[in-house]
Image (cartoon, rainbow, N blue to C red):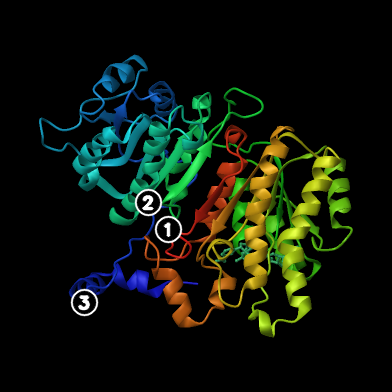
């Protein structure tokens, strides 16, 4: 569905009227196109304390052919970057800011005490006005729960407040994230760096992600232009909406897809599958025999590498007015079916070491929503499943993560009454709804073979919605 206010506010007359009346002026978001570089513009780097990620950053920027500049808080970057063969230089002269940049990256991994927090002020105070529209900001820290002292854990935890506030302040479609990298996981940074610095994360902001040491240690070499090359991937609910976008993005990234939907959606399913050179599988995931059928199909295929649990339904009613079958249908399809399918695929060996499970939750599962007790229970349950299964699956070398979409422009949200729809669109830092492709890009990042350090994460794709924040 088109967002006519977004088009209006970006027309010359509309923009003047919006300024005059003090109305929000959301910017059209830059989205990734196959073949384009990670970043169009340079990255400004800064740090506090004794930063620990500089070699990993130099390697990552070299691999993505990014141009970097050093803030005065990080004078050692110039030499290190030169050694790595990167184009670099100092940013700003004396106290004057330097050129506009596309991204800010601040390495806070060495910050041991809140008394060092001034380094963050210096960097972001200097640079806040120098980020281009649709720019990217990344703060890198160490997971507070694993810090060696309470002082360090406190400082590291404090980064959350800073990043979430910056995500609200910077506006102009700039996204801001915090990534906690565990000690020993520095070599796992690149897939996340690429995602959060590129237009792929257009509608993801104010998020906190943890990268850990994968069960199979070491960086995985991937072709970054087609990171899912040769991967067999099941996408449920793939005949339309977000599921069709997931299939499309994964096909673009080189995957061989198995697109699943209910038999009633066969026509749409066949169309998507034919367009993407994928296999269509008509099956109701809620049926008792679906897990066995899927395990058999996967084994006959030589195993699958990734499973995306996207299929979902809503049957909204307040609980007092809700019939029991509506409750049961939603819990069964959105949650219990996923649990059964995961067990069947893992126990049968159809999903092996290196496998990825990516689930679709919802901000309703985080914030709760009137008329959605069944749906919110199921989507909060998905988060519970991801968090509880992550350590269990890690022993088998499999990761499990979830995305929690906010207001995404699909048939589901087109059916929402006008006033609620407008509120959903505007009550976030991007001032607009997301597109199915925004959810799909986040799922593709979790699915990447290079994302072995990511498990147990729940990332909201909601433009930093105020709901449940
Ligand atoms: N659109 C949003 O704003 C939004 C927000 C948060 C979460 N989500 C979640 O994203 C996912 C996709 O949502 P969407 O907006 O594309 O919805 P949609 O209704 O357009 O698509 C869902 C698909 O799942 C399929 N499906 C439903 N039950 C099934 C079953 N038993 N077996 C197999 N397939 C089944 C449907 O046929 C449909 O093709 C859902 O899990 C939804 O809860 C959507």
Q: Splitting the image into four quadrants, where does ligand 1 fall?
A: bottom right
Q: List x then y, in percent, for residue 37.
A: 42, 38
Q: Nearer the viewer, mark 2 or mark 3?
A: 2
Between marks 1 and 2, how big is the CA–CA gap?
A: 9 Å
For marks 1 and 2, the one nearer the N-term is: 2
Assess disc 3: are there few (<14), some (14-19) or many (≥20) residues with their C-alpha within 10 Å of its C-alpha: few
Residue 32 visible in the shown view: no
Residue at point 64%, 61% (across, down): 379
In what quadrant of the picture does the C terminus appear? Answer: bottom left
Residue 21: mark: 3
The tag on residue 82 is none
Q: Quadrant of residue 131?
A: top left
Direction from residue 78 to residue 351 in the image, left or right = right
Residue furthest to the top: 83
Horizontal relation, residue 260 to residue 136: left or right:
right
Say which element carries label 1.
loop
Q: SS at mark 3?
A: helix
Residue 132 x %, y %:
27, 47
Characterize the local packing of mark 1: few (<14), some (14-19) or many (20 or more) Cα atoms within 10 angstroms. Answer: many
The vertical placement of 245 against 331, above or below, is: above
**Badge 2, how many Cα within 10 Å: few under 14, some, many 20+?**
many
Q: Are marks 1 and 2 in contact (CB under 8 Å)?
A: yes
Q: Residue visible at 62% across and 29% down?
A: 214
Q: Which residue is mark 1?
A: 464
Q: Is residue 319 left or right of residue 197?
A: right
**Disc 2 marks which residue?**
164
Q: At which x and y percent is residue 124?
A: 25, 42
> Which residue is nearer to you in this view: 8 or 457?
457
| Quadrant of the image occupied by residue 378 | bottom right
């Amino acid at each position: 569905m088109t967002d006519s206010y977004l088009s209006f506010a970006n027309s010359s007359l509309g923009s003047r009227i919006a300024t005059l009346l003090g109305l929000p002026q959301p910017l059209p978001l830059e989205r990734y196109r196959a073949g384009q570089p990670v970043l169009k513009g340079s990255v400004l780097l800064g740090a506090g304390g004794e930063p620990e990620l500089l070699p990993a950053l130099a390697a990552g920027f070299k691999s993505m052919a990014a141009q970097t500049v050093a803030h005065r808080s990080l004078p050692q970057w110039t030499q290190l970057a030169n050694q790595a063969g990167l184009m670099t230089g100092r940013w700003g002269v004396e106290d004057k800011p330097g050129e506009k940049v596309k991204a800010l990256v601040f390495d806070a991994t060495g910050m041991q005490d809140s008394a060092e927090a001034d380094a963050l002020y210096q960097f972001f105070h200097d640079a806040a006005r120098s980020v281009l529209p649709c720019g990217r900001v990344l703060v890198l820290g160490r997971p507070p729960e694993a810090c060696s002292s309470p002082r360090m854990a406190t400082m590291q935890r404090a980064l959350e407040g800073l990043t979430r506030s910056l995500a609200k302040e910077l506006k102009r479609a700039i996204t801001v994230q915090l990534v906690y990298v565990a000690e020993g996981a520095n070599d796992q940074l690149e897939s996340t760096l690429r995602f959060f610095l590129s237009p792929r994360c257009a509608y993801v902001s104010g998020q906190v992600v943890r990268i850990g040491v994968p069960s199979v240690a070491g960086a995985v070499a991937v072709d970054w232009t087609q990171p899912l090359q040769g991967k067999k991937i099941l996408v449920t609910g793939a005949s339309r909406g977000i599921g069709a976008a997931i299939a499309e993005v994964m096909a673009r990234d080189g995957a061989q897809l198995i697109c699943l939907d209910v038999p009633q959606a066969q026509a749409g399913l066949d169309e998507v599958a034919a367009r993407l050179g994928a296999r269509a599988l008509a099956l109701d995931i809620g049926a008792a025999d679906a897990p066995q059928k899927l395990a058999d199909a996967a084994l006959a295929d030589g195993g699958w590498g990734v499973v995306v649990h996207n299929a979902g339904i809503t049957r909204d009613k307040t609980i007092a007015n809700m019939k029991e079958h509506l409750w049961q249908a939603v819990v069964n399809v959105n949650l219990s079916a996923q649990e059964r399918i995961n067990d069947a695929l893992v126990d049968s060996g159809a999903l092996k070491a290196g496998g990825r499970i990516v689930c679709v939750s919802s901000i309703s599962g985080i914030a709760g929503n009137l008329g959605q007790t069944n749906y919110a229970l199921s989507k909060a349950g998905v988060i519970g499943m991801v968090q509880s299964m992550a350590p269990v699956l890690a022993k088998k070398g499999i990761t499990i993560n979830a995305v929690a979409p906010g207001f995404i422009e699909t048939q589901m949200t087109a059916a929402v009454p006008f006033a609620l729809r407008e509120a959903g669109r505007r009550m976030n830092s991007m001032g607009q709804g997301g597109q199915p492709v925004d959810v799909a890009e986040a799922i593709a990042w979790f699915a990447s073979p290079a994302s072995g350090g990511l498990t147990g994460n729940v990332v909201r794709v909601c433009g930093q919605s105020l709901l449940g924040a």
